[in-house]
């Protein structure tokens, strides 16, 4: 057997050599560069060519050479077919980049700076060599700096001095099967999309090569993501420039609401936010800031879902500074505040997006200012005018921020006219102020006043049937008091000022809104207001007394203005005042002026005594809903139209002109204005001059011991109907004629409002004696006069006639006349005696009635006629009886003869 030993040693030597050779060959294969492995795959030639084109081959080789820890690298290489499919698609040629910066980043996204573990979870994020940086796009380190024109501003992202993900590379998500094998790369959180792994090559000790069937897309810039993602369309309201700026903010962790989440907004918030107003665009950025964090988990760590779960419990700080809790539900679902994260880890160039099903509003709402609410309600012109007038501090106070020093203290109620109404008002305003629309810096006091007049302090959700509310407009003539505005409600209408409410009340921000169809007109001065209110007689009186300018300018005044019918109801008194410029008219007008603001709602049910401009006192009170006025010398009046607002106060319309005690209206003053000069002369000629005195030395014959004289004055034209010469021939006839026109009226009953302006009560069939009547010491049985209502006519608004009682019609004599006018004396009332009462003007002279001889013997003739009637009746009775008795006697004699 010894001879077999040499062969044994030779065999062992051969096996040793073979083992060494095999080990050397395997070691040579394992130490091969991963880039060289790419050359073994002809289907990856385009990928290799692009690595060479972008000068990434030296970079990858250098990484492998300096891999002291032998962590290796992982390359996901798309096939040539994948590149061809990408280039032939609708995407165009993304590789057409002269500097190849974009291509470099895209290729680096296919490389991991470590060997992919053989085992791992089904879905896991892995960091790549792609370091997103806008700066690297525009100022790449290789092959050199992109030249820029000196006058050209830096490209967006030029301020980025590092990566958009800090010092971290971009991530990709890898999917594994149950055995741990990589099946897809670049998928989303649901394992969808991405590229399929075709094969795996692990022949190199420097890493692993995966062949994939698609070119991986790098996570898009944030602006591209917001524009393209199907469930974040709401953020497309952000402008392109703003989106581009947001895309340059590094390391963003975003919790963006899905489209359905916006339905939780209030209708007004939604209408505003989804509009195109610049303010709304700013709010979109604010909302983004509430839902995004550039701090993430701290230490430049973006808040990926796995890190958020691992860091429980944790909070993230939003861009705007507020902290939001991140929690995990019992089902393992992440929550951002109260909103659930429904889609995790959507990668973007500068961070990660988590889609949530709700809104995170720090104060529970959007924080709508009044300006935003008005814009949402299409009150655009109102907003622009508020800013033009310098009143924006009324509408731009954020309800969740401390009140600014210059901002007025609310809450407020805004009365908003329609855009068309405001444009019409501004057009009318511009007609008198041409510079206003073109240059808001000019005097815009009227515009400012109009807008302030449409702002009410406090919140008014409902109105009383009738009332007045204070506004934010403080006219100088009210001396610190706010101007008021009328409000009224019915079953189907709400009116504010002269405008009809179209919509409201609406709760918006910290205020209440009412939309009206027209601009509420600011109250004018008292004279203009009286003219507009058809109080022409009052204006005429002001002009007559030359007090027009004083009334326009006098501050904080209340006027009791009679309507035109109230002047007419005073008859000769009004005529006297309006046809003379005297101190009497001045006193009467100032008697109707009350210093101070006496609105009806400021008066109580008790009489409030108020001094007048004239110096006398007036009293006012509110009885239920009626405003009553009285003076010390007259009965109370019911105000017919209260609270007509002026720029100096208020006007109350009263039914009648009233004369103060300081203005005596005498018979003589009334007679002078009555167009009865001939009758006045006749009175003097007949010796009745004492009628013009203020008191009479006549004993009153009435139950109360008080009577008044009412003078009947025929017009001058009435004297054409009689022969006055005959009366002048006989002083007795002249005195009788005058005495026939002097009535004595009992003054016992208190006058009521209906006859307040008349010298006597005009009642049908009423009778009053004259000085000619025997009952008061006269000479005639026909000295009394009676009244009869005949209906109003053109010549007489009163409608009454007055005539001699029991007078018979006599040819060429007039015993009845129509009352054409009247006037009541105004002077202190005596407790006893006869006082002047007033005047009635007539269209005819009442001549004294003297009956003929037939009428004078009327009683005798009545007795004779009665005797004749009775005698005739007696004769008829006798005749009838004789005939009846004679007929009976004749019948009885005839029957007796027949028996014989």
Image (cartoon, helix red, strand yellow):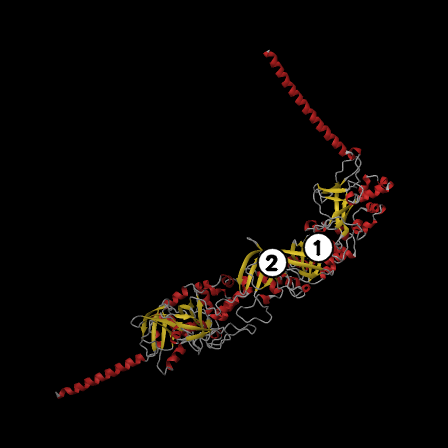
Q: Are marks 1 and 2 in contact (CB under 8 Å)?
A: no
- Quadrant in the picture for residue 634: bottom right
**In front: label 1 or label 2:** 1
Q: Residue furthest top?
A: 900
- Pick whichever, 900 or 287, lies toward us: 900
Residue 634's disc number: 1
Task: Residue 897: name its quadrant.
Answer: top right
Q: Residue furthest front?
A: 900
Q: Which residue is mark 2?
A: 467
Left/right placement of residue 28 relative to residue 755 reads: left
Q: Given the current orientation, which residue lies at the most extreme left position?
A: 1
Q: CA distance from mark 1 to mark 2?
A: 29 Å
Residue under the point 39% across and 80% down: 62
| Label whose residue precedes the other's in the sequence (1 or 2) | 2
Height in image: 202 above or below 736? below
Closest to the observer, 470 or 229: 470
Regarding residue 68, the answer to whether it shows in the image is: yes
Q: Quadrant of residue 789?
A: top right
Q: Position of residue 670 (x, y in %)?
A: 78, 50
Q: Position of residue 186 (x, y in %)?
A: 38, 70
Q: Quadrant of the N terminus?
A: bottom left
Residues packed near mark 2 inside 10 Å, few (<14), some (14 to 19) or many (20 plus): some
Which residue is rendered at x = 24% and y = 84% of the image? Answer: 17
Can you give x and y, in whole percent of width and height, for residue 860 in the image? 76, 33
Q: Position of residue 811 (x, y in %)?
A: 79, 35
Q: Nearer the viewer, residue 652 or 412?
A: 652
Q: Secondary structure at mark 2?
A: strand
Question: Viewer-proximal residue, 596 or 632?
Answer: 632
Q: Is residue 257 above or below residue 849?
A: below
Looking at the image, can residue 578 be seen?
A: no
Q: Is residue 47 left or right of residue 568?
A: left
């Amino acid at each position: 057997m010894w001879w077999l030993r040499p062969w044994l040693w030779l065999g062992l030597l051969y096996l040793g050599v073979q083992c060494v050779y095999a080990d050397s060959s395997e070691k040579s294969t394992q130490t091969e560069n991963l880039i060289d492995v790419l050359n073994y795959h002809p289907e990856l030639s385009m990928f290799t060519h692009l690595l060479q084109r972008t000068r990434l081959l030296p970079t990858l080789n250098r990484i492998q050479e300096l891999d002291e820890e032998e962590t290796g690298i992982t390359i996901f290489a798309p096939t040539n077919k994948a590149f061809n499919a990408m280039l032939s698609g609708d995407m165009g040629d993304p590789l057409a980049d002269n500097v190849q910066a974009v291509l470099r980043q895209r290729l680096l996204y296919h490389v991991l700076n470590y060997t992919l573990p053989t085992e791992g979870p089904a879905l896991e994020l892995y960091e790549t060599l792609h370091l997103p940086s806008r700066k690297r796009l525009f100022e790449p380190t290789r092959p050199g700096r992109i030249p820029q024109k000196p006058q050209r501003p830096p490209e967006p992202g030029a301020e980025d001095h590092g990566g958009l993900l800090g010092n971290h590379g971009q991530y990709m998500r890898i999917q594994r099967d149950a055995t741990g094998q990589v099946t897809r790369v670049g998928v989303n959180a649901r394992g969808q999309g991405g590229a399929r792994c075709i094969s795996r090559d692990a022949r190199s000790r420097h890493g692993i090569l995966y062949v994939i069937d698609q070119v991986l897309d790098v996570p898009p810039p944030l602006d591209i993501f917001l524009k393209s993602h199907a469930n974040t369309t709401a953020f497309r309201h952000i402008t392109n420039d703003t989106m581009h700026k947001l895309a340059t903010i590094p390391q963003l962790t975003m919790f963006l609401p899905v489209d359905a989440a916006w339905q939780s907004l209030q209708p007004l918030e939604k209408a505003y936010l989804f509009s195109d107003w610049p303010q709304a665009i700013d709010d979109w950025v604010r909302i983004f800031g509430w839902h995004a964090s550039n701090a993430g988990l701290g230490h430049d760590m973006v808040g990926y879902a796995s890190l958020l779960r691992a860091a429980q419990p944790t909070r993230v700080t939003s861009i705007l500074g507020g902290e939001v809790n991140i929690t995990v539900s019992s089902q393992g679902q992440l929550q951002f505040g109260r909103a659930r994260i429904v889609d995790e880890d959507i990668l973007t160039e500068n961070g990660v997006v988590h889609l949530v099903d709700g809104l995170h509003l720090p104060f529970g709402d959007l924080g709508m200012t009044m300006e935003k609410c008005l814009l949402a309600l299409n009150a655009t012109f109102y907003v622009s005018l508020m800013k033009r007038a310098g009143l924006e501090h009324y509408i731009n106070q954020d309800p969740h921020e401390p009140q600014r020093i210059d901002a007025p203290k609310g809450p407020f109620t805004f009365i908003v006219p329609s855009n068309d109404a405001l444009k019409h008002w501004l057009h009318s305003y511009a007609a008198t102020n041409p510079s206003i629309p073109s240059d808001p810096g000019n005097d815009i006091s009227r515009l400012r006043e109009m807008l302030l007049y449409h702002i009410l302090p406090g919140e008014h959700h409902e109105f009383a049937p009738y009332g007045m509310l204070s506004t934010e407009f403080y006219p100088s003539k009210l001396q610190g008091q706010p101007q008021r505005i009328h409000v009224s409600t019915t079953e189907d209408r709400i009116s504010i000022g002269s405008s009809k409410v179209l919509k409201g009340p609406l709760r918006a921000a910290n205020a209440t809104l009412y939309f009206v169809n027209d601009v509420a007109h600011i109250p004018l001065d008292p004279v203009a207001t009286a003219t507009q209110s058809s109080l022409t007689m009052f204006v005429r009186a002001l002009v007559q007394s030359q007090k027009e300018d004083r009334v326009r300018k006098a501050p904080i005044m209340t006027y009791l203005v009679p309507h035109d019918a109230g002047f007419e109801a005073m008859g000769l008194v009004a005529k006297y005042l309006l046809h003379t410029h005297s101190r009497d008219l001045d006193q009467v007008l100032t008697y109707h002026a009350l210093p101070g603001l006496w609105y009806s709602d400021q008066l109580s049910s008790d009489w409030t005594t108020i001094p007048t401009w004239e110096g006398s006192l007036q009293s006012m009170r509110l009885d239920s809903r009626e405003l009553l006025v009285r003076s010390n010398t007259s009965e109370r009046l019911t105000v017919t139209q209260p609270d007509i607002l002026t720029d100096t106060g208020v006007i109350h319309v009263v039914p009648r002109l009233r004369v103060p005690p300081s203005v005596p209206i005498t018979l003589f003053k009334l007679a002078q204005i009555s167009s009865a000069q001939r009758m006045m002369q006749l009175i003097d000629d007949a010796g009745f001059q004492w009628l013009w005195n203020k008191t009479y030395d006549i004993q009153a014959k009435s139950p109360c011991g008080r009577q008044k004289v009412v003078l009947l004055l025929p017009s001058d034209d009435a004297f054409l109907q009689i022969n006055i010469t005959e009366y002048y021939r006989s002083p007795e006839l002249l005195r009788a004629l005058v005495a026939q026109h002097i009535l004595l009226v009992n003054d016992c009953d208190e006058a009521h409002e209906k006859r307040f302006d008349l010298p006597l009560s005009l009642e049908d069939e009423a009778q009053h004696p004259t000085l000619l009547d025997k009952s008061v010491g006269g000479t005639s049985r026909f000295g009394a006069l009676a009244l009869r209502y005949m209906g109003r006519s053109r010549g007489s608004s009163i409608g009454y006639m007055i005539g001699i009682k029991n007078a018979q019609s006599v040819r060429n004599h007039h015993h009845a006349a129509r009352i054409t006018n009247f006037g009541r004396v105004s002077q202190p009332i005596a407790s006893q005696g006869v006082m002047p009462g007033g005047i009635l003007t007539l269209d005819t002279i009442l001549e004294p009635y003297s009956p003929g001889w037939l009428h004078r013997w009327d009683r005798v003739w009545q007795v004779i006629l009665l005797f004749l009637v009775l005698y005739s009746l007696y004769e008829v009775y006798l005749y009838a009886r004789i005939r009846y008795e004679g007929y009976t006697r004749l019948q009885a004699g005839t029957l007796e003869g027949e028996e014989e």
